[in-house]
Amino acid sequence: MRGAHPRVVLGLHRSRHERRLLTGALNAGVTSLDTAFNYFGFRSHQVLAQIAGDLLPKFAVSTKVGYFPGPKGTTHSLNPVRLLGAVEQTARDLGREPELVFLHNPEQSLLAAGPPGRDMLTTACAAMTEAVKKGLCGAWGVATWDPRPLVDLIGTTVPRPAVLMVRAGLLVGGRALDAADALTATWGTDDGGVWGMSPFGGSARDPLWTAFDPRVFLREGSGLSRVQAAFRLAYALPSVDAVAVGTDEPAHLGELVGALAAEVDESAVDGYRCLLRERMRGQSD
Ligand SMILES: NC(=O)c1ccc[n+]([C@@H]2O[C@H](COP(=O)([O-])OP(=O)(O)OC[C@H]3O[C@@H](n4cnc5c(N)ncnc54)[C@H](OP(=O)(O)O)[C@@H]3O)[C@@H](O)[C@H]2O)c1
């Protein structure tokens, strides 16, 4: 087994939930696992406990609450009672308390709420704080696919999460990158407190990854594949401490871990961010 790589998180959003994936992750030194209440048809926690209950203590497990099964399909809610209930059920289904529980895409409910959104978010964050106090999880966080609606809401009144998780990598647009930076600055998250997600936007087979060479953003990236370079770059777009990545192929995790040693060319990244801002200024929206 390789040394631990806390900066790589195995995300189970699209994964097959097979034991070999978890043993492969441990062998690659990946000891953080990210799932959600709604992943795998709302069965992720139960299935993990069934197929790998003995392995789970070897991982730092993070999960998310916010999506619930409804009569017409999945619904989103920030109702504090439902959130707390979901965290309680999570600990039961996993067979142990997770290290971290994220509020899952709170913007989904906030966009529909309009101006009362800040109170709604404050109450939801208070429910997560309560879950930690009750010992149902080690810490709480916010995972947001689109951080833009949160920026104007959080001010100084919304409780600060231990971890903020945002989209990362080359597919993230300029406005989302700026919003992620703004949230990080306002919340002032601790060291290790900002995670990236979805570095390939869900698929490394997108033609983009053959058309564009992300190695131009690395100082000495010539030994890496384009996929490895895109993964390494995700730690800098925006600046994050860890990245949650999905795979069904344990060997792929090893490749990604191998990319961590590469150095990002910060001036190239800064130049790219400037270009994105110039482009945004030229757009009305
Ligand atoms: N709102 C939220 O909270 C939210 C939303 C999205 C994602 N996330 C988190 O982020 C995690 C990852 O996101 P994601 O699943 O959307 O997508 P992703 O990590 O951007 O992409 C996953 C894809 O990348 C491929 N891949 C990974 N390593 C590779 C390698 N070395 N070589 C070739 N292909 C490789 C995988 O294919 P193979 O199976 O062939 O390796 C898989 O199809 C999720 O599981 C979840 O934890 C959170």
Image (cartoon, rainbow, N blue to C red):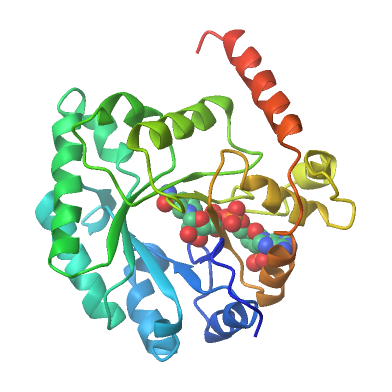
In the picture, which quadrant includes the N terminus?
bottom right
Depth check, front residue: 115 or 232: 232
Depth check, front residue: 96 or 105: 96
Residue 147 in view (yes/no)? no
Percent across and percent down for residue 53 are 38, 88
**In the image, ligand 1 is in what quadrant?**
bottom right
The residue sitting at 38% across, 72% down in the picture is: 44
Q: How many marks?
A: 0
Residue lying farthest bottom?
A: 54
Q: Is residue 127 above or below residue 172?
A: below
Q: Is residue 37 above or below residue 176?
A: below
Q: Is residue 183 above or below residue 46?
A: above
Percent across and percent down for residue 250 are 66, 76
Residue 96 figure quarter: bottom left
Percent across and percent down for residue 196 are 52, 49
Residue 234 in view (yes/no)? yes
Left or right of residue 128, residue 46 in this image = right
Depth check, front residue: 107 or 130: 130
The residue sitting at 76% across, 54% down in the picture is: 262
Left or right of residue 109, residue 25 in this image = right
The residue sitting at 63% across, 38% down in the picture is: 171
Residue 133 figure quarter: bottom left
Q: Is residue 77 above or below residue 265?
A: below
The residue sitting at 36% across, 84% down in the picture is: 49
Left or right of residue 165, residue 4 in this image = right
Percent across and percent down for residue 14 are 52, 63
Residue lying farthest left?
A: 81
